[in-house]
Amino acid sequence: MKKELMTPLTAKDIEALRIGDIVYLSGTLVTGRDDVLRRVLHEHMECPVDFSKAAIFHGGPIIRTNVDGTFECVAIGPTSSIRMENDQADFIKVTGLKIIIGKGGMGEKTAAGCKKYKCIHCVYPGGCAVKAADMVERVEGVEWPELGMPEALWIFRVRQFGPLIVSIDTQGNNLFTENLARYQSQKEKCEAPIIASVKEYQKI
Amino acid sequence: MQKEEAEKKLQETMEKFMKLVSIRLPDDVLEKLKECRDKESSDMQKVIYDSYFENLDVAIKEQRPCCQDTGLLHFYLKAGSEFPYLGVVEEALRKATRNATRDIPLRQNTVNFFEERNTKDNTGERIPWIHWDIVPDDDHLEVCTYYAGGGCCLPGCAKVFTPFDGYGAIVKYVFDAVAGLGVNACPPLIVGVGLGTNVENAAVLSKIAYLRPLGTHHPNPKGAKMERDLCDGLNRLGIGAQGLPGKVAAMEVHIESSARHTATIAVGVNVACYAHRRGFITFDRDLKATIRGYRGAEL
């Protein structure tokens, strides 16, 4: 059976989840990435969305504006979450955010923030943008449209949005840091035979 | 054909082609991606590849761009010196980009430096990016269209090493790029490696490398062996789809090279995500278009 989360989320809803778990989200999902974090944390602008009641999605959609002025989500997928690493923990603190959805891993600063303020980071498979758009029930609105299509706050109502792979849990475990360390530890061993085989390449 | 008419025809054909490329992966990439899927065995990798293929199917069914990051438009041209409409090509590609952004639609991704406002039509200073190669005594125009998403541009890097550092430095540099930021760039990746004499020629060659059709090799046997060895080595790191544990980090590694200064070894690395939206279209002197790599597709 699909494990489903429903916004608004409380710490209790997410504290049993562990890295590697797969969940699906229903409720309010709002896009917010580089420019949104900068505005809230560095330009001290008041955030027009209450992120304590919504999931944040690191990503920008393709939106079609219909003739009647309503919006249609053509495609939506995640961007690399690591770009938000410097600000994400403070953003959790300031907004009361409970769930971040993005692509790839985030670092130790975010993991510490997730542990301290009870939040999780999940990965939605990158590039799967039409499948994701089909899980958007409707576009409820947009805030800060002047930031442009990818950077604005797009407010979506979603249904069983996923698969979402938990990559940071509320204990601060971090799937990607663990994996990266493993990849790095393999690097020298994998490089060595190739380096040996090209050693003679400069000889004539 | 008058210039105006030629420009319009080129532009309209390119708009249709850009739509195809944004929606559907070329046959070589799709086949390779299936091979990659079959090598993976973990449940998590299976969930990810299922999402990949389900999405690619539904993108075709619903005729929408398969990935939301339709990037910035890059056009790599091989233009015959005798192609009669060289002068209208750039304007046709700019207009096609503008119209495709509105009509497909594509995501509006383009921001000019210092102005910092989204241009909303994916044109901007020197964008779409257009790279020209002239083919002597030929009257065709080949356009390689590529949607360069942000995620797979981020790991891109180039550096100049010394002869003392040797070819080993190239190996290490490629591994660092893939095992570092490459993990976030939607593996399995196509890794382009440019070898040259200075930083920009290595960088450009790394781009040309990953645009090459899959299954092609560096013309020098040593270069071809290095491509295979790098690919096998990267696939032993334990990186799978989406940078999560698995077996296939790289679909292929492609190397392109130029001669180098005796005192330098320049390396560029560029990675392309699995959603490799790259397509070739060729126009003859009457602007009749032929597409390759998309079985059964018509414009």
Image (cartoon, coloured by chain):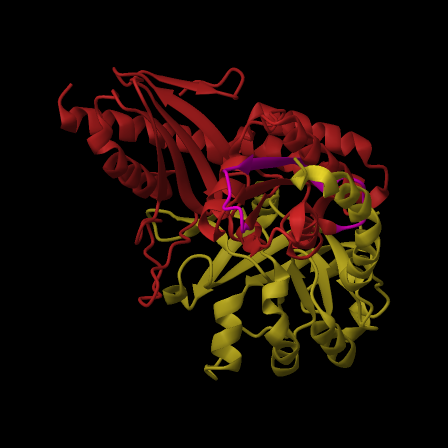
The image quarter in which residue A172 lies: bottom right
Where is residue B101 drawn, in percent x and y? Answer: 36, 43
Chain corresponding to red in the figure: B
Nearer to us in this view, B193 or B261? B261
Nearer to us in this view, A113 or A73? A113
**Residue located 46% across and 81% down the image:** A45
Is B14 left, or right, of B47 in this rendering?
Answer: left
Where is residue A129 drawn, in percent x and y? Answer: 57, 45
Is A166 left, or right, of B149 in this rendering?
Answer: right
Nearer to us in this view, B200 or A98? B200
**Residue located 72% across and 39% down the image:** A200
Q: Is residue B168 above or below residue A140?
A: above
How many numbered discs? 0
Q: Is residue B105 visible from the viewing direction of this image?
A: no
Is B271 left, or right, of A191 in this rendering?
Answer: left
The image quarter in which residue B131 lies: top left
Chain corresponding to yellow in the figure: A
Q: Is residue B261 above or below residue A15?
A: above
- Quadrant in the picture for the N terminus of chain B: top left
Main SS of the magenta part reads: loop
> What span is colored magenta in the figure?
B244-264
Q: Is residue A166 above or below residue A189?
A: below
The image quarter in which residue B51 lies: top right
**Residue located 31% across and 43% down the image:** B98
Q: Is residue B172 visible from the viewing direction of this image?
A: yes
Where is residue B104 drawn, in percent x and y? Answer: 40, 38
**Residue located 66% across and 60% down the image:** A101
Where is residue B7 drawn, in percent x and y? Answer: 21, 29
- Magenta segment: does it hold B257? yes
